[in-house]
Protein backbone atom coordinates (compact mmCIF):
# COMPACT_ATOMS: atom_id res chain seq x y z
CA UNK A 1 0.00 0.00 0.00
CA UNK A 2 1.21 3.46 -0.65
CA UNK A 3 0.24 6.87 0.61
CA UNK A 4 -1.51 7.94 -2.59
CA UNK A 5 -3.80 4.91 -2.64
CA UNK A 6 -4.58 5.33 1.05
CA UNK A 7 -5.49 9.01 0.65
CA UNK A 8 -7.71 8.23 -2.32
CA UNK A 9 -9.35 5.29 -0.52
CA UNK A 10 -10.20 7.24 2.63
CA UNK A 11 -11.19 10.39 0.75
CA UNK A 12 -13.65 8.48 -1.40
CA UNK A 13 -14.95 6.54 1.61
CA UNK A 14 -15.79 9.92 3.16
CA UNK A 15 -17.51 11.01 -0.05
CA UNK A 16 -15.01 13.84 -0.47
CA UNK A 17 -13.82 15.21 -3.77
CA UNK A 18 -10.21 16.24 -4.24
CA UNK A 19 -11.41 19.84 -4.22
CA UNK A 20 -13.10 19.48 -0.83
CA UNK A 21 -10.07 17.77 0.71
CA UNK A 22 -7.74 20.38 -0.77
CA UNK A 23 -9.88 23.18 0.63
CA UNK A 24 -10.08 21.62 4.11
CA UNK A 25 -6.34 20.88 4.16
CA UNK A 26 -5.43 24.28 2.74
CA UNK A 27 -3.66 22.64 -0.20
CA UNK A 28 -4.17 22.86 -3.94
CA UNK A 29 -6.32 20.35 -5.77
CA UNK A 30 -3.44 19.61 -8.11
CA UNK A 31 -1.19 18.80 -5.12
CA UNK A 32 -3.78 16.34 -3.76
CA UNK A 33 -3.95 14.78 -7.22
CA UNK A 34 -0.17 14.46 -7.36
CA UNK A 35 -0.13 12.88 -3.89
CA UNK A 36 -2.77 10.35 -4.94
CA UNK A 37 -0.65 9.49 -7.98
CA UNK A 38 2.41 9.10 -5.72
CA UNK A 39 4.23 11.85 -7.58
CA UNK A 40 5.04 13.84 -4.44
CA UNK A 41 6.60 12.99 -1.08
CA UNK A 42 4.83 15.17 1.47
CA UNK A 43 6.26 16.41 4.73
CA UNK A 44 5.05 14.65 7.86
CA UNK A 45 3.05 17.73 8.82
CA UNK A 46 1.19 17.49 5.50
CA UNK A 47 0.42 13.80 6.12
CA UNK A 48 -0.92 14.71 9.58
CA UNK A 49 -3.01 17.51 8.12
CA UNK A 50 -4.53 15.28 5.44
CA UNK A 51 -5.17 12.45 7.93
CA UNK A 52 -7.01 14.90 10.19
CA UNK A 53 -9.11 16.18 7.31
CA UNK A 54 -10.14 12.70 6.15
CA UNK A 55 -10.84 11.66 9.72
CA UNK A 56 -8.28 8.95 10.30
CA UNK A 57 -5.63 8.91 13.02
CA UNK A 58 -2.20 9.53 11.57
CA UNK A 59 -0.88 6.41 13.30
CA UNK A 60 -3.40 4.18 11.51
CA UNK A 61 -2.65 5.81 8.17
CA UNK A 62 1.09 5.31 8.68
CA UNK A 63 0.59 1.69 9.74
CA UNK A 64 -1.48 0.95 6.64
CA UNK A 65 1.08 2.46 4.27
CA UNK A 66 4.11 0.90 5.92
CA UNK A 67 6.18 -1.62 4.03
CA UNK A 68 5.70 -5.17 5.36
CA UNK A 69 9.48 -5.43 5.79
CA UNK A 70 9.32 -2.51 8.23
CA UNK A 71 6.84 -4.46 10.34
CA UNK A 72 8.76 -7.73 10.33
CA UNK A 73 10.26 -6.96 13.73
CA UNK A 74 6.78 -6.88 15.30
CA UNK A 75 5.46 -10.01 16.93
CA UNK A 76 2.83 -11.67 14.73
CA UNK A 77 0.14 -11.30 17.41
CA UNK A 78 0.82 -7.57 17.78
CA UNK A 79 0.77 -7.04 14.01
CA UNK A 80 -2.56 -8.88 13.79
CA UNK A 81 -4.03 -6.77 16.61
CA UNK A 82 -2.86 -3.59 14.89
CA UNK A 83 -4.35 -4.80 11.60
CA UNK A 84 -7.65 -5.63 13.26
CA UNK A 85 -7.78 -2.25 15.02
CA UNK A 86 -7.09 -0.42 11.76
CA UNK A 87 -9.72 -2.43 9.92
CA UNK A 88 -12.30 -1.88 12.66
CA UNK A 89 -11.69 1.86 12.54
CA UNK A 90 -12.09 1.93 8.78
CA UNK A 91 -15.35 0.00 8.84
CA UNK A 92 -16.80 2.08 11.69
CA UNK A 93 -15.96 5.34 9.97
CA UNK A 94 -16.95 4.34 6.44
CA UNK A 95 -19.61 6.67 5.11
CA UNK A 96 -21.22 3.75 3.25
CA UNK A 97 -20.42 0.37 4.81
CA UNK A 98 -21.90 -1.46 1.82
CA UNK A 99 -19.44 0.38 -0.40
CA UNK A 100 -16.64 -0.88 1.82
CA UNK A 101 -17.78 -4.49 1.51
CA UNK A 102 -18.06 -4.19 -2.26
CA UNK A 103 -14.50 -2.89 -2.27
CA UNK A 104 -13.21 -5.47 0.23
CA UNK A 105 -11.22 -7.48 -2.32
CA UNK A 106 -9.68 -4.32 -3.73
CA UNK A 107 -8.98 -3.12 -0.20
CA UNK A 108 -7.23 -6.36 0.73
CA UNK A 109 -5.06 -6.25 -2.39
CA UNK A 110 -4.21 -2.60 -1.84
CA UNK A 111 -3.39 -2.84 1.84
CA UNK A 112 -1.29 -5.97 1.60
CA UNK A 113 -1.24 -9.36 3.19
CA UNK A 114 -0.99 -8.22 6.80
CA UNK A 115 -4.57 -6.93 6.54
CA UNK A 116 -5.96 -9.45 4.07
CA UNK A 117 -6.27 -12.24 6.61
CA UNK A 118 -7.76 -9.92 9.22
CA UNK A 119 -10.15 -8.44 6.68
CA UNK A 120 -11.31 -11.84 5.54
CA UNK A 121 -11.82 -13.04 9.11
CA UNK A 122 -13.65 -9.88 10.10
CA UNK A 123 -16.01 -9.91 7.11
CA UNK A 124 -16.79 -13.62 7.55
CA UNK A 125 -17.39 -13.23 11.30
CA UNK A 126 -19.77 -10.25 10.99
Image (spheres, helix red, strand yellow):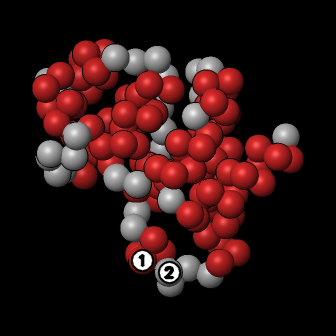
Q: How crowded is mark 2: few (under 14 residues within 10 Å), some or many (20 or more)?
A: few
**Residue appearing at x 53%, y 42% in the figure:** 106
Q: Tell me the quarter of the image containing the N terminus.
A: bottom left
Q: How many marks?
A: 2
34 versus 80 height, above or below: above
Q: Residue 37 at what x, y percent from top left?
A: 22, 40
Q: Residue 8 at what x, y percent from top left?
A: 37, 33
Residue 69: assigned label: 1
**Residue appearing at x 68%, y 51% in the figure:** 119
Residues at circles 2 and 1 in contact by the CB criterion of under 8 Å: yes
Camera-side residue: 53 or 97? 97
Q: Tell me the quarter of the image containing the C terminus.
A: top right
Q: Mark 2 points at which residue?
A: 72
Camera-side residue: 113 or 28? 113
Asked if residue 112 lies left or right of residue 30, the reply is right
Residue 101: assigned label: none
Asked if residue 76 lies left or right of residue 62, the reply is right
Amino acid sequence: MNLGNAIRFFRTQRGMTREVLADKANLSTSYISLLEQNKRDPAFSTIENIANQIGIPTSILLFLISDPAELSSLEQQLAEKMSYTALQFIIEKASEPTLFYRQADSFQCSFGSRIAHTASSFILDH
